[in-house]
Amino acid sequence: SSAASDVYKRQYMVSARAKAATTDHKGTFNGFGSAPDTIVIDHLYYRGKLKCQLFATLDGNYGAPYISDHYPIAMVFTL
């Protein structure tokens, strides 16, 4: 890679969802059940030498139908 490319990679953040080795394409906004499941409004970015291994939208049952109007997000990074 070129020196300019290396500088770009160090200066700008990248999408965890787009770069994750394992990811999903689920929506992150649920509107307490009133929104379609395709709306993504939570975007997580990182930079540096980290590698995003997992990006997951946690839409499981947590003892209540909806714990928020957004689903929790989980990410796993390695150095």
Image: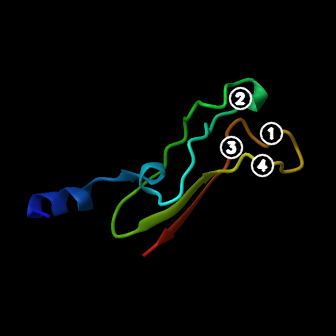
| Residue identified by numbered label 1 | 66
| Residue identified by numbered label 2 | 31
Judged from the image, the secondary structure of the residue bearing numbered disc 4 is loop
Looking at the rendered image, the disc whose residue lies closer to the viewer, 2 or 4, is 4
Looking at the rendered image, the disc whose residue lies closer to the viewer, 3 or 4, is 4
Marks 1 and 2, Cα distance to the nearest angstrom? 9 Å
The residue furthest right is 63
Marks 1 and 4, Cα distance to the nearest angstrom? 9 Å
Residue 17 pos. (x, y %) = 48, 50
| Residue identified by numbered label 3 | 71
Q: Is residue 76 left or right of residue 37?
A: left
Residue positioned 61% across, 40% down in the render: 26
Work out whether mark 3 precedes mark 1 in sequence or the reverse, and give the earlier one. Answer: 1
Count of residue discs: 4
Marks 2 and 3, Cα distance to the nearest angstrom? 10 Å
The residue furthest bottom is 79
Q: Quadrant of the N terminus?
A: bottom left
Question: Label for residue 60?
Answer: 4
- Categorize mark 2 by other alpha carbons within 10 Å: few (<14), some (14-19), many (20+): some
Marks 2 and 4, Cα distance to the nearest angstrom? 15 Å
Residue positioned 54% across, 53% down in the render: 23
Residue 15 pos. (x, y %) = 41, 50
Please report contact status of discs 2 and 4: CB closer than 8 Å, yes or no. no
Q: Which amino acid lies under the numbered mark 2 shown in the image of this protein?
A: Gly
Marks 3 and 1, Cα distance to the nearest angstrom? 8 Å
Residue 40 pos. (x, y %) = 55, 35
Judged from the image, the secondary structure of the residue bearing numbered disc 2 is helix
